[in-house]
Image (cartoon, helix red, strand yellow):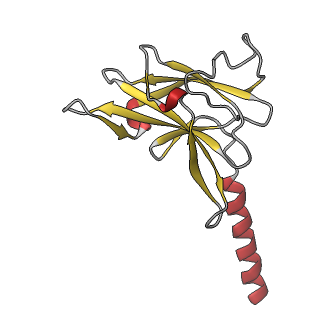
Amino acid sequence: MKKQLLIIALLSSVSVGISAKDWDGDPMFEGDVIKMRAALIRCGGVTIAAKSGVDVKVQSRLYSLSWFFGTKVRPQAILTKKKRWVQLPPGGLRARYGWPGKGGFFGVACRIQNERGVWVSTPCSQVVELDDVKHNSACIPGPLGPRAAYRPLNMKRK
């Protein structure tokens, strides 16, 4: 009986580990941010567009493994040029992303203006849409590449 319980516990921990690694880096909403990452020598591109009638600003951050109090993914650096928030233009912003390092990802946070005119953080899934995703393509210009520039979000490993 003890062997059966041990085997069941072992199999369930393996399946949890496998399911946690199922995400291949496609841009997706998680919590309040949009997270994305490309494979080691690959790039990706995504258009981040505001939903109709909403003014949105975005800022990119690098999230990476922190070994200080256990293994956790934490925000490490703001990548947006001059650490500013970027206003989404009409039609959206085409952003390029690369490989963030082992176990990390790039996160894009969103802000909207409240009724008093103050910019406040908000879940990206409520105010933006992701369109024209080109994931893990070659890092070359032209139609075979991600068709995007790193600036102004700068989602690349330094």
Quadrant position of residue 139: top right
Name the residue: 50% across, 32% down.
83
From the viewer's side, name the closer residue of 63 and 18: 63
Q: Quadrant of residue 68?
A: bottom right
What residue lies at 37% left-to-right and 34% top-to-bottom? Answer: 111
Q: Is residue 134 visible?
A: no
Residue at x-position 67% and y-position 55%: 19
Q: Work out whether 149 lies above or below 97.
A: above
Picture quadrant where residue 97 is located: top right
Q: Quadrant of the C terminus?
A: top right
Judge by depth and name the residue closer to the eye, 92 or 62.
62
Judge whether residue 54 can be spotted in this image: yes
**Image coords of residue 9 (percent x, y):** 70, 76
Q: Quadrant of the N terminus?
A: bottom right
Q: Position of residue 80 (x, y in %)?
A: 53, 30
Q: Position of residue 125 (x, y in %)?
A: 43, 37
Instruction: Give the residue furthest to the top.
Output: 142
Q: Residue at x 23, y 29 (%)?
A: 117
